[in-house]
Amino acid sequence: MTQAVPALPPPLVEDAVGRALVEDLGRAGDITSAATIPADATATAVIAARQPGILAGIDLAAATFRQMHPAIGFEPVIADGGPLEPGAVVARVTGPARPILSAERVALNFLCHLSGIATLTRRYADAIAHTKARITCTRKTTPGLRALEKYAVRCGGGSNHRFGLDDAILIKDNHIAVAGGVAEAVRRANAFAGHLVKVEVEVDDLDQLEEALRAGADVILLDNMPPEMLRRAVAVTAGAAVLEASGGVTLDTVAAIAETGVDFISSGAITHSAPALDLALDIGIEP
Amino acid sequence: MTQAVPALPPPLVEDAVGRALVEDLGRAGDITSAATIPADATATAVIAARQPGILAGIDLAAATFRQMHPAIGFEPVIADGGPLEPGAVVARVTGPARPILSAERVALNFLCHLSGIATLTRRYADAIAHTKARITCTRKTTPGLRALEKYAVRCGGGSNHRFGLDDAILIKDNHIAVAGGVAEAVRRANAFAGHLVKVEVEVDDLDQLEEALRAGADVILLDNMPPEMLRRAVAVTAGAAVLEASGGVTLDTVAAIAETGVDFISSGAITHSAPALDLALDIGIEP
Amino acid sequence: MTQAVPALPPPLVEDAVGRALVEDLGRAGDITSAATIPADATATAVIAARQPGILAGIDLAAATFRQMHPAIGFEPVIADGGPLEPGAVVARVTGPARPILSAERVALNFLCHLSGIATLTRRYADAIAHTKARITCTRKTTPGLRALEKYAVRCGGGSNHRFGLDDAILIKDNHIAVAGGVAEAVRRANAFAGHLVKVEVEVDDLDQLEEALRAGADVILLDNMPPEMLRRAVAVTAGAAVLEASGGVTLDTVAAIAETGVDFISSGAITHSAPALDLALDIGIEP
Amino acid sequence: MTQAVPALPPPLVEDAVGRALVEDLGRAGDITSAATIPADATATAVIAARQPGILAGIDLAAATFRQMHPAIGFEPVIADGGPLEPGAVVARVTGPARPILSAERVALNFLCHLSGIATLTRRYADAIAHTKARITCTRKTTPGLRALEKYAVRCGGGSNHRFGLDDAILIKDNHIAVAGGVAEAVRRANAFAGHLVKVEVEVDDLDQLEEALRAGADVILLDNMPPEMLRRAVAVTAGAAVLEASGGVTLDTVAAIAETGVDFISSGAITHSAPALDLALDIGIEP
Amino acid sequence: MTQAVPALPPPLVEDAVGRALVEDLGRAGDITSAATIPADATATAVIAARQPGILAGIDLAAATFRQMHPAIGFEPVIADGGPLEPGAVVARVTGPARPILSAERVALNFLCHLSGIATLTRRYADAIAHTKARITCTRKTTPGLRALEKYAVRCGGGSNHRFGLDDAILIKDNHIAVAGGVAEAVRRANAFAGHLVKVEVEVDDLDQLEEALRAGADVILLDNMPPEMLRRAVAVTAGAAVLEASGGVTLDTVAAIAETGVDFISSGAITHSAPALDLALDIGIEP
Amino acid sequence: MTQAVPALPPPLVEDAVGRALVEDLGRAGDITSAATIPADATATAVIAARQPGILAGIDLAAATFRQMHPAIGFEPVIADGGPLEPGAVVARVTGPARPILSAERVALNFLCHLSGIATLTRRYADAIAHTKARITCTRKTTPGLRALEKYAVRCGGGSNHRFGLDDAILIKDNHIAVAGGVAEAVRRANAFAGHLVKVEVEVDDLDQLEEALRAGADVILLDNMPPEMLRRAVAVTAGAAVLEASGGVTLDTVAAIAETGVDFISSGAITHSAPALDLALDIGIEP
């Protein structure tokens, strides 16, 4: 398979785009284009990158123009996950000028936001490419955009953590405290979970780690451990569980964390604090 | 009036929170808490800041806990727009432990995202507080969250640009090119717009500025002009229109731009590239 | 530009039509056509006017037939805003007979309601065509149909007032009373509003008018003033603000009001009390 | 039972009100009240009639204020269906001033529109009160508001025709033509319809009427017949079917039609062309 | 007319399918196919029956594949209502392999559920085919699927009872008790109901039946009467009202009930307890 | 913890109930109760079982009455998962009579459908209670009700398989064929899946089983194997993977399958073919 990132489910794309268009068009639509552009003017445009980065969201851009007007043609040039250089043409857009101008900002808002996430993810991924570790996201996403942002993480070469409270068990300190310890919490989780649900447990030290291993957790979250302790955790675990490191992860620290031998490094920042990537629509209009 | 930022319309709050909860709860709900926390356990928690910043989104956090379970008590301590120091308690949350844990992430995702925008906005606002200029947002917002993000800009002391394509006219270079010039574009806009709609036009140089002034634009967007040209634009305009500067606006450049005498400085970065502010839920549970 | 009225945003059209179809089809659909019309019968129909008037809503009619069945062809003959004589063919509809019959009433309900508004608006517009005044609508619209009804006002040659509580400031008597006077209310509004938001203030007499002018309101609403007082208001204002007259506006009084020199005359009646225009579907069916 | 008009189903009320509020609040909410009214100001208001008429929509008004802010108190004074004199207090509203002002227009839009329908319906009902005939509505309603408008017809003393294409069969001329005659169309309808579905057929003359009677139609629609022909139809029918007259129904003609002895007289005008009834909110605010 | 069962209204089909797809795709879509099937693989598949039965839901299956991907071809082979033998090909599906696999389960869930209802209905219908009685459904349907399930009943040769609380009056024992008797309850119903609404009343014995007949009920529900009493009820009624029997209806008893001469026999089991019919997708994939 | 089945997420409950009420109330609401029951009548009612079984859906019933009218009191007596004997009182309902009657059928439809699933699941669970195997559901659920039906499975003592296409990987024969074998398919799945996602693979014989074990699948689906082969599969696996048996599972066969030593036995029938459990509302009304 040459395409690394399978497409978003079409119903999710259509729904997100429909909401965004209604949000921007409001009750009267694009009154500027209505006032200044003849109804029969046509346009030829390209979406181009203005910064280097990784593309994400091309299907959302396509759907934005299509929903705005069926006569708009949209030809993608670069696939999601593809690298962008400044000036790189991402897609070509042709058709009636008014609806192209009306759809421009919504299409770019999707592309810039999601490509920003993909680009930051890729920077983390590149920083640890010499190790076996993979960068992974969290549930710290923008409300309403989780599926899209997690898709952008995949476009950037990252891996996805659970998508919600329902698709995996992640036992944190509060759950452990109430349950009366790591072992009992994992036991309750295994008793409760269906057989297609993984159980992860957060541990703060090596004692808890050994307790989690004995309890049979699938994944163990090593929270805020310094590299040396992570290294010892990797040795103690010896492949008996998947290890995920979290806490204090930045572009400066991620390589050292990865080199300890952990399997995954999770970062909220790649979704909640990625700056937008600069893309723009360059357009020529025939009145 | 002591409260600087009027509340978001309740229906918008309820709708955004409802979507976010469904997104996170998925089809099975919070299986971790269900597995590990007794149904009758109760909790006392505080939402606290871990970074200095400006608060935004407290009503969304309140609605998140309320929608999750009517028995949860939520007592706000700091109002939106208020300054946060590390450790500052933002709100107190008490009630059944399971739904408090289930709602935690959604509530924090709203608070961290919106407070991030408010905090970055405030940094720009502070940088130009010695001038008459105000920082203002754009339509470069996260799809689906425009009303919330623009509210966060107000919490940070910023001013709002138009909310969509429909509530003001903003004539850009493409509109001008098709219409045949600034004057004709503004004329068409004034002929088209209702009397409660302002007309803004983007100009690239002083010739266009003078044409826009003669045409009677309400607001003129000075695009990518160096400070010296902005200063001349202010002098030429002499109060006959509101002046907005855009392009190349960063925390390093914004003061110099503001000191030219323009009225507004617009920045997409305050909404599309604001890093999340770190807030957390500290919780004690009685099993 | 030859087309006076730019199209409604497609997402608004599709959503309104979808709701209306579901409302009429209910849970079992068109049981009369199902019972009496063969599944393979075809029909040729025209939508025709039975009264003189102004057309509005042709895109909604088109979307109604398209959503009901993709095989229905819809060819518009007259554009929105165009004049109708009794018998005038508005559109041709061809295709499978059952869904054409099923969609008939919804399509006509849109056309008759919106053309009714356009027609009444045009009567007001014609009555003041010898003046510079324009007729404008209010927020007194049918719940859920504001964008469509304001569009119909434009089709009838009217101008649009604000679309909601959020896109312009309109200070009324209660706001003034609480704020402590016209000047203070306008000052608060200007301090609060973004630079793309116009501020209108309602005044009852010439003293308030002068106060409003001094305060720098963009638009002044002259409420329930007799023509003579309106004339004096126009003279006092001398172009320093846009003037809107309201109150007691009927087809009998509107010319006298317009002749005072005001810029806009607002009427709730053109949206909330316009009788439907009579249009019908004439159909021939081939069994 | 003293209450003539049972309440609308609460879920329909809540949904209609929610949409209307979002439509009016837009993305920024009521910026005028936010700018000019202190957050802690309280208000005491009454909704009062300014015209004589019949009330409809009080539950929608109540829900509008409740959805806008839970602290608003709403006390209905007159029940739907009750007569209104100018000045009559319909309801009392107390609580925080800002949300009361924000909800005012939506609440009034429901009340004025629906009371307008109830009032016009009552005028028709009064005009035929000396006969056994009842006025009934059609499917010519405002798209999206059918349930509400049909409820308003009941408030005005009218009777409801079918609510959509699915809850009764109404065979019109086109169905008859395709089916090959009245008898065959009614036969198909009876064969198709469930036993809880009534079958009505439209006839143009007495021959068709006799055919419809022989075919066993439940209800016969006498379309556009002059009073004399209606009278003969009543005699021919002799109680064997319910008779509904339609066409040319106005306040001037309705009594003569009713006096022919028909059971129902249907009018599209009572829903599609009823002018709004004037009601207003009189408010006092404590800053 | 050769087609016994008119199609479901398209908007109902599209909405039900859209919800079902979102439910199954969740937030990440079909990760199995994404992982294992090349993006450019194509597939040829047939939907085939594995049990004898009656088909229902083919339009829902078609819409499922279409909504999942516009490039999927769907060719129906058997129409709804048609009989199925094991192995019978119901439809052919061709196109991109991934979305065909992703849509398979949703399409089958519709077909198996609705065909199950149609098949059970047909068994009842066949059991009484030698009588004039017809089997009819109730409001005991799966929440959210009433229109679809009632459609499946029609596909199976059954007749539809009312679709909701609003489209017919059905007076049960509690209504009778409060109203003070059958006669008074029917009188109230006739006074309240519009002329397109049928009135049915439930009776427990022959005295109540006679009271209901005198009161002029359109339909009388004979509740839980043994065959002998049903026979007497038929004789007493003598065609003056439609008779519906309910209670104790099984495949073993239905013929005896039908042979009493009642017009309709209602069964909740045909909708709420019909086992799914086994259909499957047989697929060949070209990688 | 004494409560075996944690509650459904409240937002899912409210949404499902809201849809079901709108579906049943239609456009005019409960016209029978409106016609026959005085507005001020009150009622006392109990929901009672008429068959032995397992309860599921009590929160949905509570929400149905609450959404219909806030003045209705609902007191649950038996918790979901609890056993029912004929006559057992499940809940008490008191308040205004009209809305209680209007909500009755929707509340019962939820309870009867979900309790039917819980009851059938419990029969399977009881049949294998002497083994370590657990009964588990599939994705063969009623469209739109998956979360509710999977919840009902838990109420009946069953375990949940994956909730959709997105929360676990299940490699079936077609995926294997295209990928080129079990090993390659599992390899691709492991490479693609996030670390919180389990990978299950379907195998037809013991060779494939050994290949799946070597490839490191988390769960192996033994499809349509006779008990003897299942027994050999258990021996070969020796605890290295979770084993799930499917195919030919009935109440007659399930014990023999369970006794082979497999971990899970999946059945579509417990969701798609469970007959409704009979519950009813017994009501007394005070006029």
Image: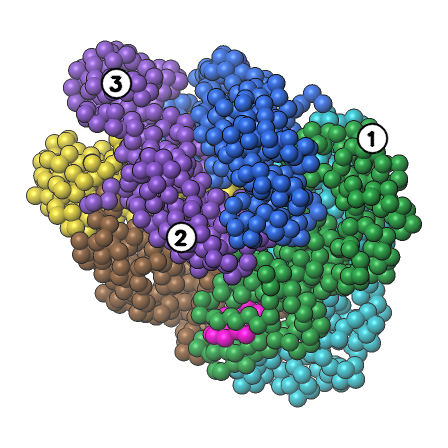
Chain colours: A yellow, B brown, C cyan, D green, E blue, F purple
Q: How far apart are marks 1 and 2 (CA)?
A: 53 Å
Q: Which chain does the residue under circle 3 lie in?
A: F
Q: Badge 3 is on which residue?
A: F257
Label 3 neighbourhood size at 10 Å, few (<14), some (14-19), many (20+)? Answer: many
Quadrant including the N terminus of chain E: top right
Q: What element carries label 2?
A: strand
Please indicate, yes or no, whether residue D214 appears anywhere in the rendered image.
yes
Direction from residue A217 to residue C84 in the image, left or right:
right
Quadrant in which residue B111 is drawn: bottom left
Q: Is residue C213 above or below residue E158?
A: below
Give the extent of the magenta segment. D91-107
Q: Quadrant of residue F119?
A: top left
In the rendered image, residue B173, in percent from the top left (x then y), is placed at 61, 55
Secondary structure under badge 1? loop
Q: What residue type is labelled 2?
A: Val
For the residue pair B186 and D27, the one nearer the viewer reads as: D27
